[in-house]
Amino acid sequence: MPVMVIDGSTVIDFVQHAESFDKAMERKFYSIDVNHDGSLSRAEVRAAFECVHILECTLGMPDAKSPRQLNKIYDSIFERFDTDHNGVVDMEEFRAQMRDILLAVAHGLGSAPLQIATEEDGFLQDAANHELEKNSAA
Ligand SMILES: [Ca+2]
Ligand SMILES: [Ca+2]
């Protein structure tokens, strides 16, 4: 599996590059919005985050989870995104929270490089792509 190494500065660079970040978040948003109604329901958010293990570190989640704990975790993720509490996550909320989460990840990484599998459609993949594009342009 192809892997590449990113560190905190890669992620911060990506988040601060508004054009790439917004574009990547838009793509992510539409891929999560499976019924294409322009907003993310609780179920859509849950489906999207079920395989994102990096969030477990970010949000300080313990490893062993019962189904009940998992429900709580996904509820808390959803509440975190739905900042105006109208029951759905819109593009602005999604983008703002992703920015916070990625910056938190970046702080967690610091300068310690993280290997990520480039086949994974993870949230850090966008940051890695941004780094690649930047390098190939230079
Ligand atoms: Ca939707
Ligand atoms: Ca909302």
Image (cartoon, rainbow, N blue to C red):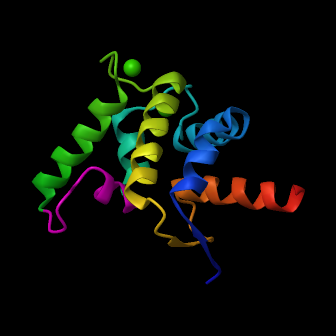
Find residue 5 and report its horizontal and vertical position in percent. 59, 72
Q: Which residue, as the protein is rendered here, is positioned at the far front?
A: 111
Q: Position of residue 63 (x, y in %)?
A: 19, 67
Q: Nearer the viewer, residue 132 or 2?
A: 132
Q: Is residue 107 above or below residue 45?
A: below
- The answer to whether 4 is drawn above or below residue 101 in the figure is below
Instruction: Please identify the quadrant where the C terminus is shown.
Output: bottom right
Residue 23 versus residue 64 in the image, above or below: above
* Occupied quadrant, residue 60: bottom left
Q: Is residue 53 magenta?
A: yes
Q: Position of residue 37 (x, y in %)?
A: 55, 26
Q: Position of residue 10 (x, y in %)?
A: 60, 55
Highlighted range, magenta: 51-65
At x 34%, y 35%, the residue is 42
> In the image, what residue occupies the spot 60% across and 59% down?
125
Q: Is residue 52 visible?
A: no
Query: Is residue 130 visible to the viewer in this orientation of the structure?
Result: yes
Q: Residue furthest right?
A: 137
Give the main secondary structure of the magenta stretch. loop
Q: Nearer the viewer, residue 106 or 111?
A: 111
Q: Residue at x 12, y 53 (%)?
A: 69
Q: Is residue 5 left or right of residue 61?
A: right
Instruction: Choose top left, top right, bottom left or bottom right for residue 1.
Output: bottom right
In the rendered image, residue 40 lying in the magenta stretch gets the answer: no
